[in-house]
Amino acid sequence: MSLLILGSVALDTVKTPIEEHTDQLGGSASYAAVAASFFSPVNLVGIVGDDFPEEHLAFFKSRNVDLEGLQIVPGKTFRWSGEYMWDMNQRETRSVELNVFENFTPDLPESYRSARLVLLGNIAPALQHHVLDQLIRPHFVIADTMDLWINIAKEELLRLIARVDMLILNDSEARELTGETSLIRAGRLIREMGPSFVAIKKGEHGCLLFGENQFFSCPAYPLEDIHDPTGAGDCFAGGLAGYLASRHLSDASLTEKKEIPFDIMRMAVVEGSVIASFNVESFSMDRLRTVTPAENVERFETFRTLSRFGAL
Ligand code: AMP
C-alpha cells in the first residue's frame, strides 16, 4: 500500500547570496514525495500546467511516485520565487504565481481513497480538508502547514488540526499559532487541539517531537555547506511519513489506527532529518538524485552519535 501525499508541484526560482536558479523543480508535494520514496511507494496528488517539463514527470516515475493523482491541465504551473539572506536561514518570498492552482480541486482517483497513511503537505487548508473528506478509513494522517495559512485561513486550519493525527510546523509558526513563547508549552497546547503527535522544526537547530507524556529532541546535522534550504521542511515531512509507511507495511502491530509507538515516531523524525539534511546540500532535488543507501545509513549513524553521551 502506498503513502498518499498532497501538496504543491512547482517551478521555483531561488536566489542565494551566491547563485540563482530559475524554474527548477519544487513544491511541497514534490520534495515530500521524493524524500518519502526512499522508504515507500508514493501516490502523488497535485496539479501542474502543460508547461511542466516531461523530464520531471519521468524523474517522479523513476522514484516509484505514482502520478495518477497529478492533474495536468492547460495553463501555467504554480511558480514560487524566494531569496535567502547571507545566513541562509532567513528567506523572503519574492513572488508567487498561482496559475493552475487557482482552480485546483484535488479529486482523488478511486484507488487512492483507501490510503492508510497520508501526508497533507503544505497547501491551502481547504484543499487538505477536501482530500481528507474523500478518504475511506485512514489510519494515520499527518499535516504540514505554513505561516501564510495561520494568517489568512486560521479557522480552517484549526478545524484541520482537530482532524489529523500529527501536525508538523516550524518554531515561529508554533509560537504564532498558540501565542506561546515557550515551544514546550506550544507543543503541548497544539496536542490539546487534536493531534496525538506534534513535530516542531527549529531549522538548523533540529526538531522537537511531542507525544502523550513523551518528548524527544532530535539534534540537527552539523552541515558545513548549505546551498539551498528550500524544501527542507517538506523533505523532513516526506522522509518521516515514508518511514512510517514502510514500518506500517512491515509490522502488523501497527495496522490499528493511531497505534504508532513513540519509539517508532522518534526513528521517523530522525529519518526525516537525515533526508532533509541531504536536500539542502544542493539546489532543487539535485542532491536527492545522488544520495546512496550507504550514505543514508552513515548519516543516520551520525545522528545516533550526536545524541549519545556518557559511557554507553
Ligand atoms: P519550504 O522551504 O519547506 O518552506 O518549502 C518551499 C516549497 O514550498 C517551494 O518549493 C515552493 O514551491 C512551495 N510553496 C511556497 N509557497 C507555497 C504555497 N503558498 N502553497 C504551496 N506551496 C508553496
Image: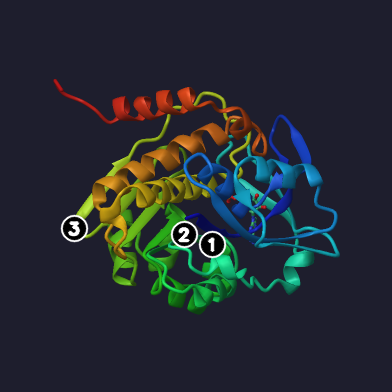
* Label disc, if present, on residue 173 of the rendered structure: 2
Residues at marks 2 and 3, CA–CA distance in whole angstroms = 22 Å
Residue found at the far left of this picture: 311
* Label disc, if present, on residue 147 of the rendered structure: 1
Screen quadrant of the C terminus: top left
| Discs 3, 1 touching: Cβ within 8 Å | no
Choose the circle earlier in sequence order: 2 or 3.
2
Q: Answer left or right for 248 relative to 278.
A: left
Q: Secondary structure at mark 2?
A: helix
Residue at 68% in and 55% down:
9
Q: Quadrant of residue 288?
A: top right
| Discs 2, 1 touching: Cβ within 8 Å | yes
Count neighbours of disc 2 (C-alpha within 10 A) and say few if under 14, some if 14 to 19, many if 20 or more: many
Amino acid marked by disc 3: Asn
The verdict on label 3 being within 8 Å of ligand 1 is: no
Q: Answer left or right for 262 relative to 281.
A: left
Q: Answer left or right for 58 relative to 136.
A: right
Residues at marks 3 and 1, CA–CA distance in whole angstroms = 27 Å
Residues at marks 2 and 1, CA–CA distance in whole angstroms = 6 Å
Amino acid marked by disc 1: Asp
